[in-house]
Image (spheres, grey):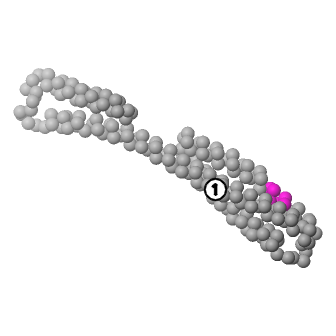
Amino acid sequence: MDFFFHKILDLEVDNYAPLLEEFDDHIAHLESKAIKKPTAELLSDILGAKKQIIRIRRKVNQQKEKISFLTKNDYKLISQKTIPYFRDVYDHIMRVNDSLDNYREDATSAFEVYMSTVSNNMNEVMKTLSIIATIALPLSVVSGIYGTNFINLPGSSYFGGFWVMIGLMTVMMLSMLYYFWRKHWF
């Protein structure tokens, strides 16, 4: 009877192997997607995988404790001959537990990669918006000054004054773009 019980436990623990392989592939896939194109759906997948790993790990820990009791204590229905077999099952469940710990860390790593990629993308957007704002600010100042209703503005009495102001603003904008380009800011 104890050999039969051992076989059932061994099969139960061995059934984790395909699940662990699936986790390995799934987490590697999530991490590569996080690097390429992070989306809200991907974040949900990463967090879902992490929750699933934690849920399975809890069940494995419960089994690990019960199998540990079988290997360390004397029971009437378990002979001394089968104790090494139960220890073997205990070793297998420990490997499963260790693998789940590694996958949990990998899922956390995938989450961190996702967050880092999103942050880098946000930094690029902010850099672009900062460049646009930096270019627009002096142009707004010049156009604001020439948009006032004063009589004595430089170039206001000159027939081509408007075009000189537009030319000056264009030169300012192109100068700033050239400066940003030389600094490799875009």
Tell me what residue is drawn at x 74 percent, y 58 percent.
95
Residue at point 13% right, 25% down?
Answer: 161
Q: Quadrant where the N terminus lies?
A: bottom right
In the rendered image, residue 52, in percent from the top left (x then y), is placed at 66, 57
Disc 1: CA contacts within 10 A as few (<14), some (14-19) or many (>=20): many
Q: Give the range drawn in magenta.
A: 10-15
Q: How many labels does the image show?
A: 1
Q: Where is residue 120 in the image (x, y as percent from the top left)?
A: 46, 43
Vertical placement of residue 28 versus 85, above or below? above
Per the image, is 11 magenta?
Answer: yes
Closer to the camera, 1 or 129? Answer: 1
* Furthest residue toward left: 152
Q: Is residue 124 left or right of residue 151?
A: right
Find residue 8 and report its horizontal and vertical position in percent: 87, 63
Rendering quarter of residue 72: bottom right
Residue 177 shows in the view: no
Residue 87 in view in this figure: yes
Q: Where is residue 103 in the image (x, y as percent from the top left)?
A: 66, 53
* Element at label 1: helix
Nearest the camera: 55 or 107?
Answer: 107
**Residue labelled with disc 1:** 104
Which amino acid does the dot numbered 1 rest on?
Arg
Front-most of residues 96 and 148: 96
Above-or-below relation of 185 to 45:
above
- Rendered residue at 81%/56% (across/down): 14
- Magenta span: helix, strand or loop, mainly? helix
- Whether the magenta-drawn stretch holds residue 48 is answered as no
